[in-house]
Image (cartoon, rainbow, N blue to C red):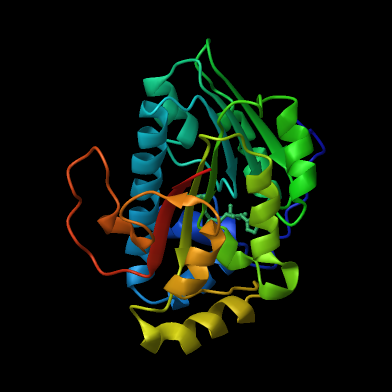
Amino acid sequence: METDFPHIDTSKPHPARVYDYLLGGKDNYLVDRQLAEQLPEHTKRGCQLNRSFMHRAAAWSARLGTTQFLDIGTGIPTPPNLHQVVQEIHPSARVVYADNDPLVMRHAQALMFSTPDGATDYVETDVREPERILEHAQDFLDFSRPVALSLIALMHFIVEEDDPYGIVRTLVDALAPGSHLILTHGTYDFHPEIEEEFNRTYRGGGMPLQLRTRAQVERFFDGLDLVEPGVVEACRWYRDTPPPPYEKNMLYVGVAQV
Ligand SMILES: C[S@@+](CC[C@H](N)C(=O)[O-])C[C@H]1O[C@@H](n2cnc3c(N)ncnc32)[C@H](O)[C@@H]1O
């Protein structure tokens, strides 16, 4: 784990802290709360649906036998975190977390409470440097065996100029057959009326944001075997659990096998 003392700029909002506030957390500053309060009401619910999907998909992958996980864009820890979900199924599961927010780094201790048989690791880094993440993760995970890569509510912070599809391709290319890509992504497809307001709020806060259509989200899975039911709304994705109640929201989710 890298241990540079984190510098936190509290004059600008940050996605991790806005999300923390929307999930009901306390690790945020006035600027984050001010931005979050301007977002449409159902954004809050979307965050909860996103988190529930992450729990379902990670547990499903673990039940299929995955014991290694690489979670990028981890966020401020909100239990249960990914390692808690998967170590309940495989106490020996190993999880690498990565995020570019120094505040997440401050909470990395909470992410490091692994089962004695398993292990967790944290690296402060940017997904726009996928090679760096892989280099770090390779010391901790065995990439000759399946790894579940989770990019949960992350890629809509990566605008076209930063080559979001190329980034995901680089990460996926490092995965062995049988690995999984678990991804969620914001969309205006179901709420076109909020596009302008949403963009204005995030970009006004200095946060680049690029929500995408279903076809654009599907592109992240190009060349992979999309697991049924494909790229769908968060509450439409369940495999071995009862279906969650339907709720319209602004999130696409999908899982694919490498
Ligand atoms: C909306 S939160 C999602 C947190 C968690 N994955 C979840 O879904 O519960 C987005 C996270 O992505 C992180 N993030 C945003 N841009 C990033 C980047 N370029 N590289 C790495 N992490 C980034 C933020 O710091 C934040 O923690």
Q: Nearer the viewer, residue 99 or 216?
A: 216
Please tell me in which quarter of the rendered image ligand 1 is found.
Answer: bottom right
What x and y, as percent, mark residue 212?
50, 74
Dividing the picture into quadrants, the one containing residue 63 is top left
Dividing the picture into quadrants, the one containing residue 22 is bottom left
What x and y, as percent, mark residue 54?
41, 45
What x and y, as percent, mark residue 193?
37, 88
Give the residue drawn at x 51%, y 72%. Answer: 216
Q: Nearer the viewer, residue 84 or 65?
A: 65
Image quarter hosting the N terminus: top right
Q: Seen in the image, is 38 located left or right of residue 146?
A: left
Dividing the picture into quadrants, the one containing residue 214 is bottom left
Give the residue drawn at x 51%, y 21%. Answer: 93
Q: Is residue 201 visible?
A: yes
Give the residue drawn at x 63%, y 38%. Answer: 175
Q: Seen in the image, is 144 located left or right of residue 217?
A: right
What x and y, as percent, mark residue 183?
49, 53
Q: Nearer the viewer, residue 10 or 199?
A: 199
Above or below, comparing residue 174 to residue 93 in the picture: below
Give the residue drawn at x 18%, y 49%. Answer: 243
Above or below, comparing residue 217 to residue 137 in the picture: below
Q: Residue furthest top?
A: 117
